[in-house]
Structures are given as C-alpha cells and as structure tokens.
Image (spheres, rainbow, N blue to C red):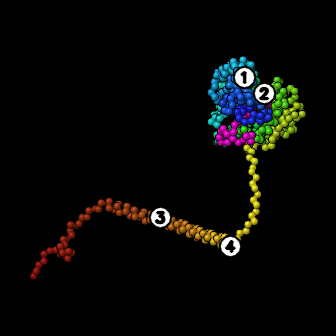
C-alpha cells in the first residue's frame, strides 16, 4: 500500500511530484483543471507513475463503467464540512457498494480539531488543559470503521501562529500532532499525517515551514505511531496575501523544501520494511529526544529541541536532527544549520546591474563659470537665511524672557491688589457695625437758664432809665 501521498495535486506537473518520491495523488472532484474530465485527469496521474486516491469515488467511472483508483477517499475534513459521524459512515457504506467492498478507504481529518486551539480559546483553561471533551465528540467517526482504513490528520503547526493573550505569538508544538495520533490509535492502527509544505497564508503572520521543521513533523510522526505521510502542496495564487510565492512554479512549495521532501521520501522507501513493522516496538520519550526501538536493534531518534544542539550518549544532535541506528551503526541522518530561524522565501535571481561606464565628456568653461556663480549665489542665500533664523531665534528668546518677567509682575500686582481689597472689606465691615448700633438719647439739665440771645447773657427784660 502506498505510504507517501500528496494532497491535493490539482494543478502542475505531476511527473515532478513523482520525481519527489510521491506515491499517491489525493484528488478531489472540483479541484481538477477544467480543461479535462475527472476520469482523464486520473488517467494522467496514473501515467505519471502514482496511485490515485479519489473523492468521490464514483466520479472516476470511465465510459466503460470501470473504476480507476486503487484506494477510495472519503469526504475530506468532515468536521469542518459539517458532516456528522452517521453521515460519514453512510458514505463509507455507499462507496463499499460501488467497489464491491474490495478496496481500502482513506479519510482526512482536520488535526486542529483534535489538538490545536484557536486564538479565541486562549482564555479558556478547559480547552488548554484537556482535549478529552473535544475528542469524545469526534470519537464516533473512528468507531466501527472498515478494517485497514487509513485516517489522515492534516496539520499546519508551523504555518499558523498560536496567539497569546497579549497578541504575541509563537508556533504550535509537535505535541499537537502526537496527541492527535494517540487519539486515533485508540481505534485504528493505520494513522497518517499530512504536513504543511506550502506557503499558504491562513493568517497574516503565516509562513511556510523550514526544512528542519518539516523534518521534525515527518520523523516525529513516524516515531509516534503514524505509518503514512502526506504533504499539502497548495496552489499558487488562490489565497491572499502571498500564497503564490513558489520556487516550483506550479505548486506553492518553497523551492528549498523540495530537497528535504525528496530526502525524507527516500528514507521512508529505503527503510519501509522497518518503519511499517510496529510489532513489539517501543516508543521512548527522554526530552528533548523521542525515539522508537525495534526488536531488530534499529532505533529512530529525533531531537525535538528547535533552539539548541543537545548531546545524547556522547553524540551531539543539532536542533531537529534525526538519526537511524542499528545498534551503534549510524544508518541515516538528516540535519540542517539554524533550523530555528523562520523560513524566508528565496529571493528571485537578481538581475545583474550593468556597471556604469565613466563619462569622457567635458563641461565647457562658460557653463562651468555660470554653475559656479549660481552655486555661490545659492550659498550666499543660505548664509543669509541662516543669519535671519539666528536673529529670529534670539528675538524669540528675549520675548520669552520679557513674558516671564511680565508674568512675575502681574503675579506680584495681583498679590498687592488682594491685600488692598482685604483692607477695604475690613473697613466696610467696621462701618456697617457702627451704623447698626442705636444712639443713646440726650437729656438737657432743667436748671440751665434759657438763652435767647444766642449766649449773650441774661434773658430778663431790659429796663430803660
């Protein structure tokens, strides 16, 4: 059964994909080029040397009524497409009728629905601490499946940012993949992981994974329990802002990821017999290392640290370095310098800038003299403007000083005026008090002789002689 798939190869050179070591092309109806029929497109995939995984299966019927794919794909991402578990199982039963129940089935589920929380969930401790309730809701999809069915989980852990409460962000850890694999293994032994290999922008801060990060996803998934690997390659120009950055023309796969994809696929084919045998194998976790041990003595090891080189058994592992041993014999390894740096799409080949040829022309003396005069005049104007600015600045400083002095004078005058007003108010209060006090009556003495002569003396009649 094919172990390495690509999802969804709707455009581009299929022979290129086959040369990368891709074994199966996962095709969805409606995602094929409009220039050919579904059946013709599937024939083109077969001609490129790959198997065909198709959805829906009946769309592959040729005019003679024959079916071409050798594995049946179900509705992809049923949770996102609101397909309930009962409807999902009904689809399986329907396709079993089409195929006579002779072909295996493959399904693809959104890995983020099983272990990756959304930015809005960062304030929900129950989401961050456990996924038991979330996964319990999805368990019916995996119960009572046909024997041998493959359940893929697609991930973009290094493509979509994980936001914190303060809106800073980092990237989802590998643990998201491992937790989802563990969940599926409860029901089916055939688990696959589809790794993001494109630069699709599903968030304003999205980026493509770098080589080391892609390696960590693939090797980490194989160690944890996955038997199948897929790559999401995308299509250029379908999403904004920058989905079309691509070094492979047809696919939105950064050109420097292609060598890593080829390296990993060759590893999986060269050691397929070992990797596919999980009987009596042991998964070990000794952070930052994870490994799987086979009874044959083979051991696949991954340094999970993305930041620093780490030593194990006297051997220095670079960040995200992977190694396969048999006993003490190193059979295979893959590492890359500085893998913790975010991926930067390669710049296009720069166009050489022609070297300017020195001019041999001379400037006539008359023109030179005129330019010199103009230059001197401009310099004089600049000097004059500079002097003017200096004088204005000095005058402004003096004005500021005068304003400050005037302010002090006004403040002092205001204080003096307050004192005068206070004295006047005090005087007025005393005057009002005096006027408000009633005057005592004045009584004249009764024995005072009357003076009708205005104080001239005796008031008795005058006698004449």
Residue 437 placement, left or right of 289: left
Q: Where's residue 157, x and y in %?
A: 71, 36
Residue on which disc 2 sits: 2
From the viewer's side, name the closer residue of 422 and 141.
Answer: 141
For label 4, the crowd category at 10 Å Cα-Cα, with few meaning under 14, some 14 to 19 and many 20 or more, is: few
Read off the magenta span. Answer: 220-249
Write the residue at 66% across / 23% down: 88
Q: Are marks 2 and 1 in contact (CB under 8 Å)?
A: no
Q: Earlier in the sequence, mark 3 or mark 4?
A: 4
From the viewer's side, name the closer residue of 215 and 399.
Answer: 215
- What's the CA distance linking mark 2 and mark 3? 98 Å
From the viewer's side, name the closer residue of 154 and 394.
Answer: 154
For label 1, the crowd category at 10 Å Cα-Cα, with few meaning under 14, some 14 to 19 and many 20 or more, is: some
Furthest toward the left, the residue is: 465
Decide whether residue 260 is among the magenta residues. Answer: no
Residue on which disc 4 sits: 366
- What's the CA distance linking mark 4 and mark 1? 89 Å
Residue on which disc 3 sits: 415
| Residue 463 visible to the viewer | yes
- What's the CA distance linking mark 3 and mark 4? 74 Å
């Amino acid at each position: 059964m094919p172990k390495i798939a690509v999802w969804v190869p709707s455009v581009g050179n299929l022979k290129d994909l086959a040369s990368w070591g891709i074994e199966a092309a996962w095709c969805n109806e409606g995602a094929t080029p409009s220039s050919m029929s579904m059946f013709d497109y599937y024939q083109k995939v077969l001609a490129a040397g790959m198997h065909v995984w198709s959805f829906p299966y009946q769309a592959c019927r040729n005019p003679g009524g024959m079916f071409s794919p050798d594995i049946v794909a179900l509705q992809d991402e049923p949770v996102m497409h609101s397909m309930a578990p009962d409807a999902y199982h009904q689809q399986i039963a329907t396709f079993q009728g089409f195929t006579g129940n002779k072909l295996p089935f493959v399904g693809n589920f959104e890995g983020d629905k099983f272990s990756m929380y959304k930015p809005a969930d960062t304030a929900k401790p129950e989401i961050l601490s456990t996924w038991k309730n979330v996964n319990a809701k999805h368990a019916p999809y995996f119960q009572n499946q046909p024997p041998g069915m493959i359940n893929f989980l697609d991930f973009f852990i290094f493509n979509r940012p994980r936001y914190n409460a303060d809106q800073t962000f980092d990237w989802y850890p590998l643990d998201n993949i491992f937790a989802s694999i563990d969940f599926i293994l409860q029901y089916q032994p055939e688990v696959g992981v589809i790794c993001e290999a494109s630069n699709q922008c599903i968030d304003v801060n999205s980026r493509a994974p770098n080589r080391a990060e892609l390696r960590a996803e693939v090797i980490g998934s194989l160690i944890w329990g996955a038997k199948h690997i897929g790559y999401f390659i995308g299509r250029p120009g379908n999403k904004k802002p920058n989905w079309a950055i691509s070094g492979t023309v047809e696919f939105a796969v950064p050109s420097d990821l292609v060598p890593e994809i080829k390296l990993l696929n060759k590893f999986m084919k060269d050691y397929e017999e070992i990797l596919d045998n999980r009987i009596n194998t042991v998964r070990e976790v000794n952070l930052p290392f994870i490994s799987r041990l086979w009874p044959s003595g083979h051991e696949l090891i991954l340094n999970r640290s993305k930041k620093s080189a780490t030593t194990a058994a006297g051997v220095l592992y670079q960040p995200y370095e992977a190694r396969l041993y048999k006993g003490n014999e190193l059979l295979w390894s893959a590492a890359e310098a500085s893998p913790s740096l975010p991926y930067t799409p390669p710049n296009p080949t720069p166009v050489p800038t022609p070297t300017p040829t020195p001019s041999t022309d001379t400037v006539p003396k008359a023109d030179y003299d005129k330019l010199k005069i103009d230059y001197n005049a401009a310099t004089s104007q600049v000097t004059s403007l500079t002097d003017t600015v200096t004088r204005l600045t000095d005058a402004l400083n003096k004005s500021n000083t005068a304003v400050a002095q005037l302010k002090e004078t006004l403040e002092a005058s205001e204080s003096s005026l307050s004192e005068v007003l206070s004295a006047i108010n005090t005087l007025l209060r005393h005057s009002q008090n005096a006027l408000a006090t009633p005057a005592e009556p004045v009584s004249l003495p009764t024995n005072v002789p009357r003076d009708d002569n205005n104080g001239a003396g005796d008031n008795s009649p005058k006698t004449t002689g």
